[in-house]
Image (spheres, grey):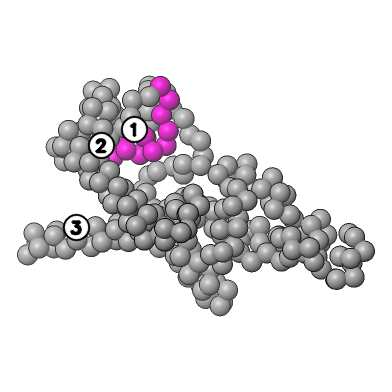
């Protein structure tokens, strides 16, 4: 601690367990490889974490800040929730409430993307219970990209294809879903870009978060419309 910092009575990195941005990254990036200084600042701008400052203006993170960051990053990764929803949850907790995170946005059966799960073709078939011709059909239909090593999302897709087969649906019947998703992603990207002032360049983290928020809105809309249509079929 410098004499100036001691006189100011401000916490400094390394004192009382406080960490600098660099130390936070060293602690959390093994678990969250995409974490960066810009994302930490972005989360602060969105009021999800409020680090203290030294007299020189450097951010310092307490153990509770670290746990809060870990919670935010884990929920965002594993539950695919937008930050506004996570912030609302944390605000309720801060007020002494006992909120429950919504589960609607969680991809059922999908291993978190951050876990680095990798599968060979044989392992993918074994884990999903699919026959080789089903995987080939999913690739032809554009549901899965052909590759030598597959990931958790590929396993989730192929498992869903196998489950859909019990209702008589083949991969070719599901191609429209891939096309619909691609159109929706294009719509989201265009909308986020169009609503950004031309004088402001969105940082990648902010662009992804705004896209995630809009996608969450459209997902809710799609679920409501689907349920409404099913209810009308039953009436």
- Which image quarter: residue 68? bottom right
Gap in angstroms between the C-alphas marked 2 and 1: 9 Å
Label 3 SS: helix
Mark 2 or mark 1, whichever is nearer to me: 2
Percent of width and height locating residue 108? 36, 48
Q: Which residue is mark 3?
A: 226
User: Against 223, is 172 above or below?
Assistant: above
Q: Which residue is mark 2?
A: 161
Query: Does the magenta portion include 159?
Result: yes
Q: Residue at x 56, y 77 (%)?
A: 96
Mark 3 or mark 1, whichever is nearer to me: 3
Say the numbered circle drawn on residue 128. Answer: 1
Label 1 SS: helix
Label 2 SS: helix
Percent of width and height locating residue 129? 31, 30
Say the numbered circle drawn on residue 174. Answer: none
In terms of sequence position, does the residue under pointer 3 or pointer 1 come before the other? 1
Q: Nearer the viewer, residue 46 or 129?
A: 46
User: Against 98, is 212 above or below?
Assistant: above
User: Against 108, is 58 above or below?
Assistant: below
| Cβ atoms at labels 3 and 2 below 8 Å apart | no
């Amino acid at each position: 601690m410098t004499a100036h910092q001691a006189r100011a009575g401000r916490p400094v990195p390394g004192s009382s367990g406080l960490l600098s941005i660099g130390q936070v990254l060293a602690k959390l990036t093994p678990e969250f490889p995409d974490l960066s200084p810009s994302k930490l600042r972005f989360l602060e701008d969105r009021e999800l974490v409020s680090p203290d400052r030294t007299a020189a203006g450097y951010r310092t993170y307490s153990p509770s800040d670290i746990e809060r960051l870990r919670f935010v990053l884990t929920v965002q990764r594993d539950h695919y929730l937008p930050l506004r929803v996570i912030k609302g949850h944390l605000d309720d907790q801060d007020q002494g409430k006992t909120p429950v995170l919504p589960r609607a946005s969680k991809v059922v059966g999908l291993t978190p993307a951050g876990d680095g799960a990798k599968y060979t073709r044989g392992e993918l078939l074994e884990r999903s219970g699919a026959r080789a011709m089903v995987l080939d059909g999913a690739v032809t239909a554009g549901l899965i990209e052909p590759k030598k090593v597959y990931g958790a999302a590929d396993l989730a897709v192929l498992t869903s294809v196998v489950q859909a087969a019990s209702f008589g649906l083949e991969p070719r019947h599901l191609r429209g879903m891939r096309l619909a998703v691609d159109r929706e992603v294009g719509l989201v990207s265009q909308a986020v870009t169009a609503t950004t002032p031309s004088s402001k360049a969105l940082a990648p983290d902010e662009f992804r978060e705004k896209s995630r928020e809009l996608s969450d809105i459209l997902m809710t809309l799609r679920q409501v419309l689907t349920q409404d249509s099913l209810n009308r079929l039953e009436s």
